[in-house]
Amino acid sequence: MARRWRSSSWWSAAPDGVAGAAAAEARRIAVLLEYDGTAYRGSQYQEGGRTIQSELEAALNNLTGETVRVAFAGRTDAGVHALGQVAAFGTRARLGAAEFVGGLNHFLPRDLAVRAAAEADARFDPRRDARGRLYRYWIDTRPVRSPLWRDRAWHVPRRLDVEAMRRAGKRLEGAHDFAAFAAPYDGTTTRTLRRCEVVGEGRCVRVEMEAQAFLPHQVRRTVGPLVEVGSGRMGEDALVRLVEEAQPSSAGPAAPACGLYLVSIAYDGLAFGAGEGDG
């Protein structure tokens, strides 16, 4: 039996067949998403594959009766997780922000949730309007693999030289041509890496990278060589030469998707409030 959801504004949520709803003015809604990417083929729609976009659009259809296309702030690959992905869509439903949070979470699967929703400007583009993106990567260096972390971190069963990794990461900060650290890309490969921080936390290592925009696979193709530095198989200078030589896709190996998290995206003039932190 199909799940049903009711709110105080349910009568005005579905635009078809409800008096007055069809004439409602179109709105732009932004939502803050958290998901476990293990079972998904990525964030964006793919024919025949389960994606974050397909699940979110199906939930919107169930909630409002509308068929909409959702735009995302950033593309995450299969197996990549998110704590703060941002998506936006147009709607004529007259639900409030908190009602979108509760209603969508009612229809979404357990590995995907809307943490918050906000009214956005009609021209809001979550990708182009972003002012900053923060990614986090977890490396588990314990000698025995953890079943609970198997899809949450990259298991590297040896101690890493975190200080060498930290120094190497700092040398990547600033504006550079990061062609070596990207998948094949048609466009400029110059990016400004605002922060590349490596921190040891017990037997785990956390890598955080922040920029306004990243190239495809840039974070994973950076973490992989940093682990090579930490393992003593690559020198810090060799990592820097990859940047200087800028040979496309020459940096590697790429770290696996399971350890990567899209943590947050910053905007001017967009504040999430309603529902944030709710499960």
Image: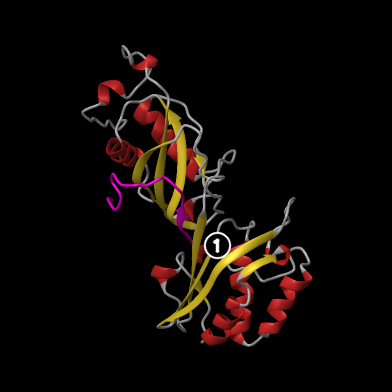
State the residue position of label 1: 257
Q: Is residue 234 visible?
A: no
Residue under the image location 66 percent in, 71 percent down: 253
Quadrant of the image occupied by residue 23: top left
Q: Determine the secondary structure under disc 1.
A: helix
Q: Nearer the viewer, residue 34 or 163?
A: 163
Residue under the image location 51 percent in, 63 percent down: 258
Residue 132: % across, % down: 51, 56
Give the magenta range: 261-279
Residue under the image location 58 percent in, 41 percent down: 46
Residue 252: % across, % down: 68, 71
Q: Which quadrant of the rendered structure holds the N terminus?
A: top left
- Seen from this angle, which residue lies furthest left? 8
Q: What scheme was used to colour the molecule?
A: secondary structure
Please count the marks in the image: 1
Q: Nearer the viewer, residue 247 or 51?
A: 247
Q: What amino acid is found at the position of numbered circle 1 in the picture?
A: Ala
Is residue 140 positioned above or below 52 on the image?
below
Q: Nearer the viewer, residue 195 or 14?
A: 195
Task: Report the side of 18 relative to 43 (left or right).
Answer: left
Is residue 218 positioned above or below 185 on the image?
below
Q: Is residue 174 visible?
A: yes
- Seen from this angle, which residue lies furthest front? 269
Task: Report the side of 135 relative to 113 (left or right).
Answer: right
Residue 180: % across, % down: 72, 66
Q: Is residue 197 magenta?
A: no
Is residue 187 positioned above or below 14 on the image?
below
